[in-house]
Image (cartoon, rainbow, N blue to C red):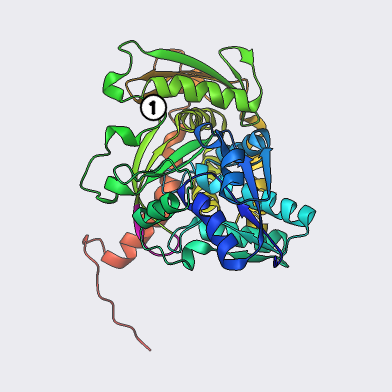
Amino acid sequence: MKKGKIVVAYSGGLDTSVMVAWLKERYKAEIITATGNLGQEKELKGVREKALRTGASKVYIRNLTKEFVEKFCFPALRAGALYEHAYPLATSLGRPLLAKMLVDVARKEGADTVAHGCSGKGNDQVRFEVSVGALAPELKVVAPLREWEFKSREEEIAYAADHGIPVTATRSSPYSIDENIWGTSIECGALEDPRRMPMADAYQRTVAPEKAPGKPEYVRIEFDNGIPVALNGKKQDSAAIVQSLNRIGGAHGVGRIDLVENRLVGIKSREIYEAPAATILHFAHTELERLTLDKPVFDLKSELAQEYANLVYNGLWYSPVRNALDAFVIETQKCVSGIIKVKLYKGAVSIASRTSPYSLYSPELATYTKRDQFDHRASEGFIKIFGLPLKTVHRVRSNGSGKIARHKIHS
């Protein structure tokens, strides 16, 4: 007799494939899988058939790509959110949307439990469970990887073989791969040794920079209010822009990131990321902000970008602080419109040209030619006022000697 329904966040990878059979066996429950298409390609092939063969009674597959790009990736791009100044948060941004999908399916099916395939020492368990708790506090969450008897991926592979579960992971190539349109994350296997360079087979969507074309390629990206709207003069929708840049950037070896990062749970992990489009767009967006934002706004936004990245990484997408930061970011982007031309060559992205109707760059003020309109005489008074506090501090504390003087305090 079945004891309720469990909705499983199902990717078709090793962990979630084993999970379906394990949950059905352990909880005697009806298993319903929910798969979100966030623009990944390889993982979706045969997912429905695999889930049904593994024991699911019903399968949901939802195309969330457009929503993912427009409501998660582009807001993070607009915010300049790069975790530890490097990682564009592809997996981190996908989890709150997948959690929302889980909640929607659970409510539709009348399920009281959802399950995810995250490990007990990873960040994703936090992202899923905090997001589900925010959206549907009445739902229970099951995390099989924190409960089951398997101690390694090799044991999971053996269980899958014994139960006729089709999986792509092998003992010789035990990578854990998560892919969406914003990027791919690869971990486990030989990558767990930070002394070793990644093996060639770890990379999924980029060519090695040394094997990239010997001729650079130039791409013009148009932004409107901080959001990409066109490539090379052609208007495209959000997902098409990202897909095009993934293809172009990947062909030039752009977007490879090898990072030892600080996980939320308190350990360091070595991750390999591939994010051609995200790398190009973050670079171009920052260059446009350098052109259009005044210094105080640019400086403050740069500081808050790290706060934004941290809260996304830590699973706090559905938080009041993220909404508040978005309000600030949106205000800063009202003049972040223009065209950035980038050069892609052998794994690198560099600036080729910048233009914006809101450019704060004034040739007449910046030039060192006779067209110079800057009032050089005004600098003397500016320096005196600007340096006065520092001059006063050192005069009082050093008595003019250049060393800190000890003063007696008289009562």
Q: Which residue appears at 52% of the width and 63% of the height?
A: 144
**The magenta segment:** 264-269
Three-letter residue code for mark 1: Thr
Q: Secondary structure at mark 1?
A: loop
Q: Is residue 109 left or right of residue 81?
A: right
Image-based side of 406 in relation to 26, left or right:
left
Instruction: Name above or below for residue 371 compared with residue 161.
Output: above
Considering depth in this image, is 209 or 56 the residue closer to the camera? 56
Residue 44's quadrant in the figure?
top right
- How many numbered discs, if any? 1
- Given residues 372 and 117, the one toward you in this image is 117
Residue 318 location, x and y as percent?
Answer: 66, 55
Q: Please, is residue 80 above or below residue 304 in the view?
A: above
Most common secondary structure along the magenta stretch: loop
56 over 173 or under it: above or below: below
Q: Quadrant of the C terminus?
A: bottom left
Specify whether residue 252 is in view. Answer: yes
Please name the residue shown 62% across and 45% down the image: 52
Q: What residue would you read off at disc 1? A: 206
Please say whether residue 59 is one of the residues in the magenta stretch.
no
* Whole-percent x, y for residue 27 in the image: 61, 67
